[in-house]
């Protein structure tokens, strides 16, 4: 089975691309959704409480807004949290991929390179979009975020140019380029 990483920075449109890939028969594992599910696990809750204390909890549940503020203002805390969560997500992906009846299994994750996950994939696809397009998409999706917060989140990830240089395939999602044809071309090359 070919394992493929689908990545791109926040606002690049990788989730939209993943939905199109699903329509074309690609099984897609959403790493962000799977990570969020892990936060309901009592062992994970205990570890987050140990790392961050009660400040990221409301009525015993993780407050993802507070957790995001804590980690996006501290690269060290973000790394510590990622070092804990990412191996769990990786294990879940491997198990999930083995259960798929397909020659290809795709993991969608914004931080493939930042998390050093690229080693587990046979191919990497990067979804790319100009930064201004990304900022506008993020504003639409998160109208309560300031532009400085959006740009800080973009800056916390590896630059798109570096991701594209490391990719096996790049899908241009600038709002003008036709996505379906790009995906179908990649499908023939996998």
Image (cartoon, rainbow, N blue to C red):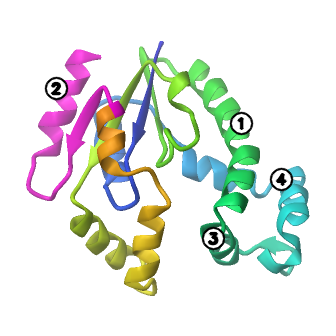
Say which label, 4 or 1, has the lower sequence index. 4
What is the magenta range? 166-190
Residue 87: assigned label = 1
Say if mark 2 contacts mark 1, CB within 8 Å.
no
The quarter of the picture where residue 73 lies is bottom right
- How many angstroms separate mark 2 from mark 4 (CA)? 40 Å
Say which label, 3 or 2, has the lower sequence index. 3
Q: Secondary structure at mark 2?
A: helix
> How many residues crowd around disc 3 within 10 Å: few (fewer than 14), some, or many (20 or more)?
some
Q: Is 165 situated left or right of 143 in this image?
A: left
Q: Position of residue 105 (x, y in %)?
A: 46, 25
The quarter of the picture where residue 50 lies is bottom right
Residue 183 versus residue 187 in the image, above or below: below
Q: Residue at x 74, y 53 (%)?
A: 80
Residue 68: assigned label = 3
**Which residue, given by chain and number where applicable, does mark 2 sit on?**
185
- How many angstroms separate mark 3 from mark 4 (CA)? 16 Å
Q: Position of residue 17 (x, y in %)?
A: 30, 46
Q: Secondary structure at mark 1?
A: helix
Please tell me which residue lies in front, 145 or 41.
145
Residue 13 versus residue 71 in the image, above or below: above
Q: Residue at x 68, y 52 (%)?
A: 79
Q: Secondary structure at mark 4?
A: helix
Q: Residue at x 75, y 57 (%)?
A: 39
Say which label, 2 or 4, has the lower sequence index. 4
**Which residue, given by chain and number where applicable, does mark 4 sit on?**
44
Q: Is 177 situated left or right of 51 in this image?
A: left
- How many angstroms separate mark 3 from mark 2 (CA)? 37 Å
Residue 25 versus residue 16 in the image, above or below: above
Q: Is 129 situated left or right of 72 in this image?
A: left
């Amino acid at each position: 089975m070919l394992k493929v990483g689908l990545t791109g920075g926040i606002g690049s449109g990788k989730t939209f691309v993943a939905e199109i890939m699903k329509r074309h028969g690609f099984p897609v594992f959403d790493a962000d959704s799977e990570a969020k599910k892990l936060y309901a696990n009592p062992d994970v809750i205990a570890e987050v409480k140990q790392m961050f204390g009660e400040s990221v909890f409301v009525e015993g549940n993780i407050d993802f807004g507070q957790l995001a503020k804590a980690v996006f203002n501290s690269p060290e805390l973000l790394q510590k949290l990622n070092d804990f969560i990412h191996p769990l997500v990786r294990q879940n992906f491997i198990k999930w991929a083995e259960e798929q009846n397909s020659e290809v299994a795709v993991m969608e994750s914004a931080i493939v390179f930042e998390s050093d996950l690229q080693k587990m994939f046979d191919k990497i696809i990067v979804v790319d979009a100009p930064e201004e397009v990304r900022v506008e998409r993020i504003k639409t999706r998160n109208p309560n975020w300031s532009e400085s917060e959006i740009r800080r989140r973009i800056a916390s990830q590896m630059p798109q140019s570096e991701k594209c240089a490391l990719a096996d395939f790049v899908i241009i999602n600038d709002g003008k380029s036709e996505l379906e044809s790009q995906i179908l071309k990649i499908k023939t090359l996998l």
